[in-house]
Image (cartoon, coloured by chain):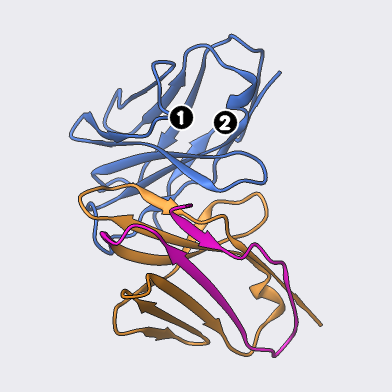
Chain colours: A orange, B blue
Amino acid sequence: RKEVEQDPGPFNVPEGATVAFNCTYSNSASQSFFWYRQDCRKEPKLLMSVYSSGNEDGRFTAQLNRASQYISLLIRDSKLSDSATYLCVVLNTGFQKLVFGTGTRLLVSP
Amino acid sequence: EPEVTQTPSHQVTQMGQEVILRCVPISNHLYFYWYRQILGQKVEFLVSFYNNEISEKSEIFDDQFSVERPDGSNFTLKIRSTKLEDSAMYFCASSGKAGGLNEQFFGPGTRLTVL
């Protein structure tokens, strides 16, 4: 089983739509969770950290369910500029390495 | 805003040649990392470095790979004898602290093409 699993997509949505991405992780000892964004042929950039209580940053909401080992990202009112690959990333206890999912590609169209 | 820089942006080499990829982490950061991403695949951890030594490495990081911080600013990844399968984007990252919710900042990457 992959350490971090994501639906690769692509998700094609119109501007203004709400879209949700899901992610599962296999290591119950994982301690920290993130969503990164990666544009084509660019470096990953941190979108937001994911807290146990869930957290929101503008149009973006992240949720964590430790019991189910499940992480989600909700994007409301999609913009053209949201088109990118969204990477689910975990950090395991005692380690410094980030473990990346394969990413979910989002295409927002006019 | 401080950023991680990497040189060169693209390196083309012949199989069996040595390459050195260079990174300048953010100046007050203490933890340094190399990741790679083969085209169309996920980002994979290679190595982390702290206090002038490797703190963790993956199984990808075999004897052909080495890292060094030769001075106070540069952090390098050396591949001694490149293979075709080493072709990938190599990202350097740095963080001020390790673990928890401390962000790792990524550089723009070096695209390595092995012919």
Q: Position of residue A88 (x, y in %)?
A: 48, 63
Left of A13 or right of it: where is A38? left
Q: What span is in magenta? A: A1-30
> Which residue type carries mark 2?
Pro
Report the amino acid beneath label 1.
Answer: Arg
Q: Which mark is residue B22?
A: 1
Q: Tell me what residue is drawn at x 39 percent, y 54 percent.
A: B2
Report helix, strand or loop for mark 1: strand
The answer to whether mark 2 and mark 1 are in CB contact below 8 A is: yes
| Residue visible at 61% across and 25% down in the picture | B85
Counting every numbered tag in the picture gives 2
Q: Is residue B20 magenta?
A: no
Q: Nearer the viewer, residue B2 or A4?
A: A4
| Residue situated in front as seen by the camera: B90 or A54 | A54
Q: Residues within 10 Å of mark 1 (few under 14, many from 20)?
A: many
Residue behind mark 2:
B8
Magenta segment: does it hold A28? yes
